[in-house]
Amino acid sequence: DVVMTQSPLSLPVTPGEPASISCRSSQSLLYSNGYNYLGWYLQKPGQSPQLLIYLGSNRASGVPDRFSGSGSGTTFTLKISRVEAEDVGIYYCMQPLHTPVTFGQGTRLEIK
Amino acid sequence: EVQLVESGGGLVQPGGSLRLSCAASTFTFSSHWMNWVRQAPGKGLEWLASIKEDGSEKEYVDSVKGRFTISRDNAENSLYLQMHSLRVEDTAVYYCSRSSSGAYDVWGQGTMVTVSS
């Protein structure tokens, strides 16, 4: 199975400051079509997960442009340029390329 | 509004069975792979199963193979998860989700399954 490793697991951030989460996969997520099959999800407290970033770097519909995704192969990063209070929750990376689909452990973002 | 609504969760005894449903609306259900993902209390997300647009391909995580069956009815815009031989460790919120562009872009609100005697 592809192991997805996120860091940090806890991320306290002051509003207005940037934040960054790393996700590493044990196998490459770069497919022959040139796309990296890596997505980022946010689960706000008491809610279902929501898609933030797909194919490594594409913002999902309605996602603020303060969120950005980068990386290729086995190393990926989610960046929030200026954290807002509504960004609180658990962030997960997920790979759907290899079966079984696997998620990272989650990174809990909290406001300082 | 594109929507997925799960139902069918509840309390079941170990060894029992349960069938979850997921009703899709406001999109062409038959054009998307669909998935089940669960989340045990206080834990992370775990993928369970996926099914191709026409139901011809199904994939499962090893921990549910032989116990859970994913299926769909495109005429009814519905996704199902039949669960047998339930264990205490199957206790979780179960989400259905839609696949699009290599990601799970729509999620339901989840349905809680509790396996306990």
Image (cartoon, coloured by chain):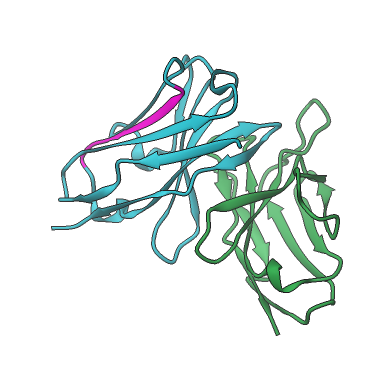
Chain colours: A green, B cyan
Residue at 79% from the left image edge and 26% from the top image edge: A32
Q: Quadrant of the image for the C terminus of chain B?
A: bottom left
Q: Quadrant of residue A84?
A: bottom right
Q: Read off the magenta span.
A: B77-85
| B105 displayed left or right of B7 | right
Q: Is residue A55 left or right of B50 when viewed as pictured?
A: right
The vertical placement of B67 against B55, above or below, is below
Viewer-nearest residue: B35 or B62: B35
Is B80 magenta? The answer is yes
Quarter of the image with the N terminus of chain B in it: top right
Q: Residue at x 43, y 66 (%)?
A: B42
Tell me if residue A85 comes above or below residue A6 in the rendering: below
Q: Residue at x 77, y 38 (%)?
A: A36
The answer to whether residue A94 is magenta is: no
Rendering coords of residue B62 (x, y %): 40, 38
What is the x, y in percent for residue A97? 64, 35
Residue B101 vs residue B65, the one in the foreground:
B101
